[in-house]
Image: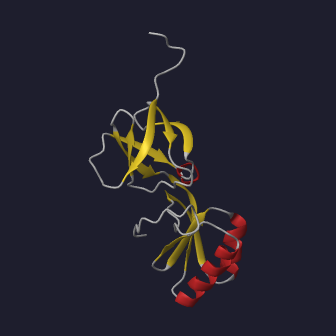
C-alpha cells in the first residue's frame, strides 16, 4: 500500500436526524464555521469536510461521510469569558454592547459567554458584571452566524 497519501474520509452531508453515531469530531467554534476543512476524527482518522457554504456545525449535529459513516459533532472546550449578573437589565445592556461590536455571544439564564478577550472582560466589568474565565464549549446564538437555526437550547 502506498503510504504517501492516506485515504481520507469525506464528510458531505449534515443529517436532519440524530442517527446513532459511529464516530465523533470535536472542534472549536472557529472551525465549526468552516465548510471546507481538513481535520481528524477523535479516533485519529483523517477527514475532509465538504459542506455547503455558510454551514455552521453545532454540538450534537450528525454528519455523514461518502461511505455512510455517521459522525457526531462535539463542541470543544475553549477559553471563554462568562459574564454574570443578577440584574436582567444589566445583562441586556452588556449583551447590546457586545453585539454592537459583532461579538459571537452565547446567552444563558443570568450569564453571557464569549470567546475570552481581556478588553471585553474589562468593559463588562466596568458595567457591573462579574466575569470569570473558563474552559467550556462555546455555542453562540446562531442568528448572525451563517443563518443555521437549529433551535438548540442554550
Q: Is residue 146 above or below residue 130?
A: above
Q: Is residue 7 above or below residue 21?
A: above
Q: Residue at x 70, y 65 (%)?
A: 118
Image-based side of 109 in relation to 67, left or right = right
Foreground: 105 or 144?
Answer: 144
Q: Residue at x 64, y 74 (%)?
A: 99
In the displayed image of the protein, which residue is found farthest to the top?
A: 1
Quarter of the image for residue 12 reads top left
Image-based side of 122 in relation to 51, left or right = right
* Quadrant of the rendering where the C terminus is positioned: bottom left
What is the tally of numbered marks visible in this picture? 0
Foreground: 42 or 71?
Answer: 71
Quarter of the image for residue 22 reads top left
Image-based side of 100 in relation to 8, left or right = right
Q: Is residue 17 above or below residue 118?
A: above
Foreground: 38 or 120?
Answer: 38
Residue 123 x %, y % = 71, 75
Foreground: 92 or 118?
Answer: 92
Q: Residue at x 39, y 37 (%)?
A: 65
Image-based side of 40 in relation to 97, left or right = left
Residue 28 x %, y % = 53, 51
* Quadrant of the rendering where the N terminus is positioned: top left
Residue 121 x %, y % = 67, 70
Residue 90 x %, y % = 59, 87
In the displayed image of the protein, which residue is found farthest to the right?
A: 119
In the displayed image of the protein, which residue is found farthest to the front?
A: 52
Amino acid at each position: 500500500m502506498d503510504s504517501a497519501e492516506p485515504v481520507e474520509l469525506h464528510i458531505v452531508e449534515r443529517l436532519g436526524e440524530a442517527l446513532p453515531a459511529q464516530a465523533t469530531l470535536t472542534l472549536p467554534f472557529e472551525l465549526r464555521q468552516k465548510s471546507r476543512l481538513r481535520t481528524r476524527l477523535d479516533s485519529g482518522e483523517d477527514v475532509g469536510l465538504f459542506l455547503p457554504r455558510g454551514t455552521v456545525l453545532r454540538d450534537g449535529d450528525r454528519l455523514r461521510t461518502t461511505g455512510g459513516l455517521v459522525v457526531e459533532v462535539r463542541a470543544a472546550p475553549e477559553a471563554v469569558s462568562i459574564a454574570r449578573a443578577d440584574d436582567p437589565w444589566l445583562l441586556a445592556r452588556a449583551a447590546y454592547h457586545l453585539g454592537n461590536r459583532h461579538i459571537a455571544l452565547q446567552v444563558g439564564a443570568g450569564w453571557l459567554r464569549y470567546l475570552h478577550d481581556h478588553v471585553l472582560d474589562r468593559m463588562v466589568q466596568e458595567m457591573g458584571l462579574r466575569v470569570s474565565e473558563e474552559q467550556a464549549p462555546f455555542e453562540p446564538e446562531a442568528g448572525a452566524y451563517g443563518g443555521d437555526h437549529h433551535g438548540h437550547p442554550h
